[in-house]
Structures are given as structure tokens and as C-alpha cells.
Image: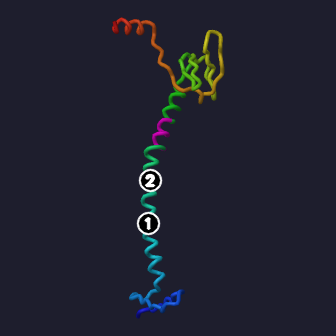
């Protein structure tokens, strides 16, 4: 059974008739085509989300985990560098902070989050051996 619809031209032209062969109103076909358009928009969005995760979120989580492990490994006597550029020796470790000696007799308390990195201290014997090898 075929449906017949009549379109009226506002400008005064003659009315035209449209018939659909499926027997469904013509507006339903347009709605079905829009559903396919929605799926074609979701796929690029999902791909973008995956790229965002693998290139931004995942590496940042990995870097944060490394920093947390570094903070947990800091002990008394280690040399550290702060985000402010101070270099000093850890004199006391607390739950949320360190006591840092930045000069002889000058001690400051800093938050653990202010430590940028742990410095590797060369002993005097190994430093002089490496200097002699360089010559």
C-alpha cells in the first residue's frame, strides 16, 4: 500500500504529490538517516578520546607515579633539588615535609611536593678517578 502526501507551494505554484513505496510516512526515512549520521559522529569522537588518553593522560600518570616513588625513597642525608632551585641535604623526614639544610646551619622546612628531583652525590674518590680518566 503506498502513501500519498501532498506538498503545497507557498508561492502559488501547483501542489505536488509524493508517494513512498514502503508505506511509511516520508519523515520516518529522514529520521532513520539521521541515526546513521549520529553513529558516524560518535566514532571519530571515540578515536579522539583514545588518542587523548594514550598521549596525554597515561604518560602523565606514569610520570606522577615515578615522582611519588622518588619521594618515598628519599632518606636522611640525600641531596635534593627543589622546584624553586634550592639544593640541599635532607636532615629530617616527616609525613608531609622535609627539613632541608641549604647551607651550614641554615635549615628550612619544605613540603614533599616541592622536591623536584633527587640528586646523585659523587663521592670524592670516584669524582677524582673520573677526572683522571678524562685527562
Above or below, 35 against 110 in this view is: below
Q: Tell me if 22 is positioned left or right of 73 in this view.
A: left
Kindly state the secondary structure of the residue where label 1 is placed: helix
Give the residue at x 48% y 82%.
27
In magenta segment, residue 104? no
Q: Residue at x 45, y 13 (%)?
A: 122
Where does the image place residue 49, in percent across and percent down from the top left?
A: 46, 52
Above/below status of 125 relative to 18: above
Give the Cα separation between the discs numbered 2 and 1.
15 Å
Q: Nearer the viewer, residue 75 or 80?
A: 80
| Residue farthest toward the bottom in the current orientation of the protein | 1
Coordinates of residue 69 in the picture (x, y in percent): 51, 31
Q: Which residue is mark 2?
A: 48
As drawn, is 71 to the left or to the right of 97?
left
Pointer 1: what residue? 39
Which quarter of the rendering shows the N terminus? bottom left
The location of residue 82, given as percent across then percent down, is 57, 24
Magenta range is: 57-63
Q: Secondary structure at mark 2?
A: helix
Q: Residue at x 59, y 27 (%)?
A: 114
* Magenta-colored stretch includes residue 58: yes
> Which quarter of the image is occupied by the C terminus?
top left
Badge 1: residue crowd in 10 Å (few <14, some 14–19, many ≥20): few
Answer with left or right where residue 108 lies relative to residue 134: right
Classified by dominant secondary structure, the portion drawn in magenta counts as helix
Amino acid at each position: 500500500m503506498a502513501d500519498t502526501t501532498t506538498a503545497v507551494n507557498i508561492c502559488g505554484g501547483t501542489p505536488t504529490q509524493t508517494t513512498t513505496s514502503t508505506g511509511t510516512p516520508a519523515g520516518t526515512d529522514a529520521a532513520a538517516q539521521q541515526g546513521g549520521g549520529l553513529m558516524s559522529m560518535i566514532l571519530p569522537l571515540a578515536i579522539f578520546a583514545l588518542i587523548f588518553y594514550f598521549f596525554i593522560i597515561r604518560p602523565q600518570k606514569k610520570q606522577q607515579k615515578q615522582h611519588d616513588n622518588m619521594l618515598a625513597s628519599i632518606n636522611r642525608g640525600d641531596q635534593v633539588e627543589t622546584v624553586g632551585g634550592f639544593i640541599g641535604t635532607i636532615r629530617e623526614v616527616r609525613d608531609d615535609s622535609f627539613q632541608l639544610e641549604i647551607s651550614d646551619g641554615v635549615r628550612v622546612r619544605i613540603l614533599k611536593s616541592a622536591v623536584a628531583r633527587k640528586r646523585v652525590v659523587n663521592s670524592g674518590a670516584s669524582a677524582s678517578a673520573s677526572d683522571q680518566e678524562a685527562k
